[in-house]
Amino acid sequence: MLFRAVSRFPPVSARALLCAVMKPLVVFVLGGPGAGKGTQCERIVEKYGYTHLSAGDLLRDERKRPGSQYGELIESYIRDGKIVPVEITISLLQRAMEQTMAANIEKNKFLIDGFPRNEDNLQGWDRTMDGKAAVSFVLFFDCDNKTCIDRCLERGKSSGRSDDNRESLEKRIQTYLQSTRPIIDLYEQRGKVRKVDASQSVDQVFNKVKEIFEHEG
């Protein structure tokens, strides 16, 4: 009788079971503007198969998306070098991860670049993603302010980004120092930070990155 009752339920596919138990494995990638986060993330994706999600890129794309209810708000925050409200950023990150895993359940490893950028971001992540995603470690690209600004100004010659100018960059550097560095320090106290000297050449930086990922497994 018990067997007959159970057999009435439709069979559960292996894919559905995997979706139920798999959750994103996340590496937060932090550092000042121009520290080389995006460049290094491209190499990590190619070598280790992670999916790269840039919080800044997601916000910029949403800002330009026709009909977006957040477009004008995001534009004003980015232009002024301020941090976009956490609810918007997390909703975009969560949507991107869900879409990636829906297309391929094995693609559950993510580099989240430029997040969390302040305490509000961190609290929002913990509140929204607790039990839904696991943070493996924080990859911290440490670079002096002058090098960061010089790199961004050079990038601004061809990037077309409205925030790659000296005025916006100086605001972004201050926001980073006041808001993001304390988050990095907090994760360091938890033993979660893996620091890289990002003032070196791209190849030198990636050699150190490879050491970290091969050690972490």
Image (cartoon, rainbow, N blue to C red):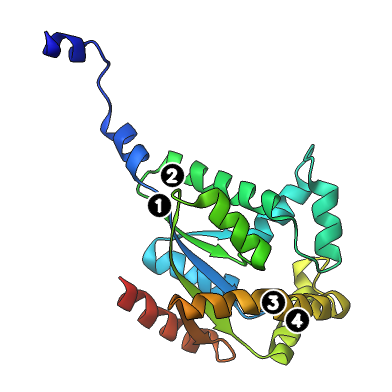
Crowd class of label 1 (few under 14; some 14 to 19; many from 20; radius 10 Å): many
Q: Helix, strand, or loop for circle 3?
A: loop
Residue beneath the point at 36% across and 39% down: 19
Residue 14 vertical position relative to residue 124 in the rendered view, above or below: above
Amino acid at the residue labelled 3: Pro
Q: Residues within 10 Å of mark 4 (few under 14, many from 20)?
A: few
Marks 4 and 1, the one that precedes in the sequence:
1
Badge nearest the viewer, 4 or 1: 1
Q: Amino acid at mark 4?
A: Glu
Q: Nearer the viewer, residue 22 or 211?
A: 22
Hey, what amino acid is under mark 2?
Answer: Met
The one of 63 and 157 positioned closer to us in this rendering: 63
Near-viewer residue (133 or 49): 133
Q: In the rendered structure, which disc, 3 or 2, sits on the residue that comes first in sequence?
A: 3
For the N terminus, the quadrant is top left
Q: Secondary structure at mark 1?
A: loop
Percent coordinates x, y for residue 99 in the rendering: 51, 42
- Is 180 situated left or right of 207 in this image? right
Label for residue 108? 1
Q: Which residue is mark 2?
A: 101
> Residue sitting at 45 percent across and 48 percent down?
132
Residues at badges 3 and 4 in contact (C-beta under 8 Å)?
no
- Asked if residue 7 lies left or right of residue 206, the reply is left
Q: CA distance from mark 2 to mark 4?
A: 36 Å
Q: Give residue 141's position: percent from left, percent from top.
A: 56, 81
Q: Looking at the rendered structure, which numbered label has been put on residue 33? A: 3
Lower position in the chain sequence, tag 2 or tag 4: 2
Mark 4 secondary-structure assignment: helix
The image quadrant that residue 125 belongs to is bottom right
